[in-house]
Structures are given as structure tokens and as C-alpha cells.
Image (spheres, helix red, strand yellow):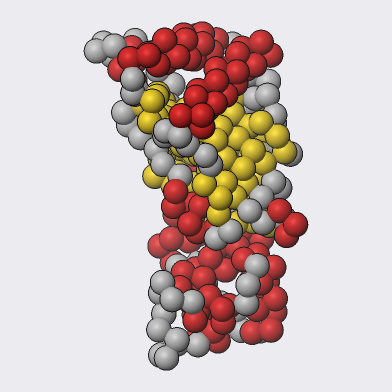
């Protein structure tokens, strides 16, 4: 099955499966404003290959029934819960783990979802991490995983199938599982980089406040006061976790709220100015410029596009 290509970011974001996910655009690359996604089911495994022609900010939670492995193939390093990983690195998401991913440029990646029962059978693992981690992975291990995933991708494309459930493909699943187990066994090796847990906790609390107060009513100063921290501490936490300032995060958050409002509005009853003002933008010219820079279209086009 060949990859699906998207020129609409929202369609691409909704196509990603396996996690509860909230995906937003940041710093789009205008010359590459295109996304592609290919999903393959190999018996109980789910593999996804993706190309993202823009920076993204994604928040999510891993499904409780399995583990996720995220592999960056190309592009500038991304932040995964404050851990910076680049091409050749793997981030591992245990069941029920929460995560935030921030990338500031075009990247390509692939991921594998593995049901926990395939790793541990019916027995509960004696010890298990509860948060995302980045193990030290030998270069040959990464290459072997990638080679196995690409082999599966090749079969999918040649046969025109997105699901490979024939008994003939069991050996491919077993080989891939064997390599994944080897990587997970090395998960307790010393980390090249440790996430700042305080920064993770602080940004999570700030984002929860934004959801509660709907963004426009909240400023960086108000966030700092409510959280009882200095603005400098908030600045450090957001840069550590997302490689962006809290002010830039707030503006991006409000722009996405405005887009959601425009997409759900009746053009006969709503205006761009109303959506902008509701989300804290009162200089409508600057709002339109920022909106177009991020989403690649004027807000009035979004308002009048039929759902």
C-alpha cells in the first residue's frame, strides 16, 4: 500500500493512529508544506512511516495495551519530553505514558506499536518504566530495526496491501519482535541525556491551565503567578521541553483555537474578526499575517471552506 499524501495538516494529523493525539503546526516550511503517512499492519504489530514538511507540536498518551517506539530518520533533532533525539535515535513510550514532541523543521520518522502481550505474554512484567525514555542504541541495532521495517514496507507496496496477515509473514513479525526485545533489554543502560522532570511537570501544569481557561484569558505572567513560579522558571521549562518560549507557545495555542473556531463557524453568522477577538487577537492585520504564515492560507479562506 503506497503512502497517503496530504496538503491539509488537519487531515494528516487525524490520520495518525495508535495514540490519543493533539497535533499542532509550528514553524511550517513553505517549500515543503506537505505531509505523507503510510500505515502497515503486520499481524499484531502496527508500523507507520511519515514525512512531515513542517515543524509540529504534539501531545498525547500511549495506549494502555502496548508499547510505542519512535524512530527519527532525518531532519533536525526533535524534543521528546525534553529529551533531544536526532536521526538514528529511538524514543520508547511505555503503556499509558504521556508525551510531548516538538519539532522545528521538516522530519521523517517511523513508529512501531507493539501489544504488551507479545513482549511479556500473559505475565505482568516485574519492573516497567512508566515514562518515555531514550535508550542508548547501538548503530547496528537501529540499522537492523530500520532494515526490517523497510522490508515489511516493501512487501506492503509490492502487494498493494496495508494489512499483512498471511501466515507467510509471521517470520517477519518474529524477527522484528526479537530485535525490539533486544533494544528494550538495553533500556536500563545509562542515558546520554536525562529529561528535567521539574520542567516536564511545570509545562504540563501550564498546558492544563490553558485548557481550563481557554488560552486567550491567560498570559505568561498570569501562568507564573498561578503556578507560583517566576517567569524565568517558566521560560526555562518551555525551552527545555519544547525548544520555544512560553509566549511563542501561547500565540501558537491561540492561533489553533482561532482556526478551530473558524472551521466550525457559519460564515453567514461569524467573521474572522470575531474569531480573532475571541482568542485574544485585536490587531486583525497582524492576526491575519500570523495565521497565514502558520497555516498557509488567509483566515477568511478557512471560514468559507465547507466542512
Residue extending furthest toward the bottom = 268
Pick the residue in front: 208 or 296: 296
- Tally of numbered discs: 0
Residue at horizontal 60 percent and vertical 63 percent from the top: 252
Pick the residue in front: 291 or 298: 298
Examine the rendered structure and indicate whether residue 180 appears above or below residue 16: above
Examine the rendered structure and indicate whether residue 237 appears above or below residue 274: above
- Left or right of residue 153: residue 122: left
Residue 129 location (% of width, % of height) = 44, 21
Residue 119 location (% of width, % of height) = 37, 14
In the rendered image, is residue 234 in sight? no
- Left or right of residue 126: residue 9: right
In the rendered image, is residue 21 in sight? yes
Residue at horizontal 70 percent and vertical 76 percent from the top: 289
Residue 283 location (% of width, % of height) = 66, 84
Residue at horizontal 54 percent and vertical 26 percent from the top: 154
Residue 241 location (% of width, % of height) = 62, 42
Examine the rendered structure and indicate whether residue 105 appears above or below residue 118: below
Task: Determine which quarter of the picture holds residue 97.
Answer: top left
- Left or right of residue 112: residue 170: left
Q: Quadrant of the C terminus?
A: bottom left
Pick the residue in front: 87 or 278: 87
Examine the rendered structure and indicate whether residue 46 appears above or below residue 307: above
Residue extending furthest toward the front = 159
Residue at horizontal 62 percent and vertical 46 percent from the top: 52
Amino acid at each position: 500500500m503506497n503512502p497517503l499524501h496530504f496538503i491539509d495538516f488537519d487531515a494528516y494529523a487525524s490520520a495518525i493512529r495508535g495514540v490519543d493525539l493533539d497535533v499542532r503546526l509550528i514553524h511550517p516550511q513553505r517549500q515543503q508544506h506537505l505531509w505523507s503517512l503510510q500505515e502497515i499492519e503486520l499481524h499484531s504489530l502496527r508500523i507507520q512511516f511519515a514525512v512531515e514538511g513542517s515543524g509540529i507540536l504534539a501531545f498525547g498518551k500511549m495506549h494502555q495495551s502496548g508499547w510505542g517506539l519512535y524512530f527519527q530518520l532525518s531532519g533536525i533533532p526533535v524534543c521528546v519530553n525534553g529529551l533531544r533525539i536526532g536521526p538514528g535515535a529511538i524514543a520508547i513510550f511505555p503503556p499509558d505514558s504521556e508525551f510531548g514532541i516538538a519539532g522545528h523543521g521538516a522530519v521523517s520518522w517511523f513508529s512501531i506499536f507493539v501489544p504488551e502481550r507479545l513482549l511479556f505474554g500473559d505475565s505482568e512484567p516485574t519492573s516497567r518504566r512508566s515514562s518515555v525514555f531514550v535508550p542508548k542504541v547501538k548503530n547496528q541495532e537501529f540499522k537492523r530495526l530500520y532494515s526490517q521495517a523497510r522490508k515489511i514496507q516493501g512487501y506492503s507496496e509490492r502487494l498493494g496491501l496495508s494489512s499483512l496477515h498471511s501466515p507467510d509473514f509471521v517470520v517477519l513479525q518474529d524477527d522484528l519482535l526479537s530485535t525490539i526485545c533486544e533494544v528494550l533489554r538495553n533500556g536500563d543502560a545509562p542515558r546520554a541525556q536525562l529529561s528535567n522532570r521539574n520542567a516536564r511537570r511545570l509545562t504540563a501544569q501550564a498546558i492544563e491551565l490553558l485548557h481550563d481557561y481557554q488560552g486567550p484569558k491567560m498570559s505568561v505572567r498570569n501562568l507564573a503567578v498561578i503556578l507560583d513560579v517566576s517567569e524565568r522558571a517558566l521560560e526555562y521549562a518551555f525551552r527545555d521541553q519544547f525548544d520555544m518560549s512560553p509566549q511563542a507557545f501561547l500565540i501558537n495555542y491561540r492561533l489553533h483555537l482561532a482556526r478551530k473556531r473558524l472551521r466550525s463557524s457559519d460564515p453567514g453568522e461569524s467573521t474572522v474578526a470575531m474569531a480573532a477577538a475571541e482568542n485574544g487577537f485585536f490587531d486583525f492585520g497582524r492576526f491575519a499575517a500570523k495565521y497565514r504564515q502558520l497555516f498557509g492560507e488567509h483566515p477568511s479562506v478557512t471560514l468559507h471552506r465547507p466542512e
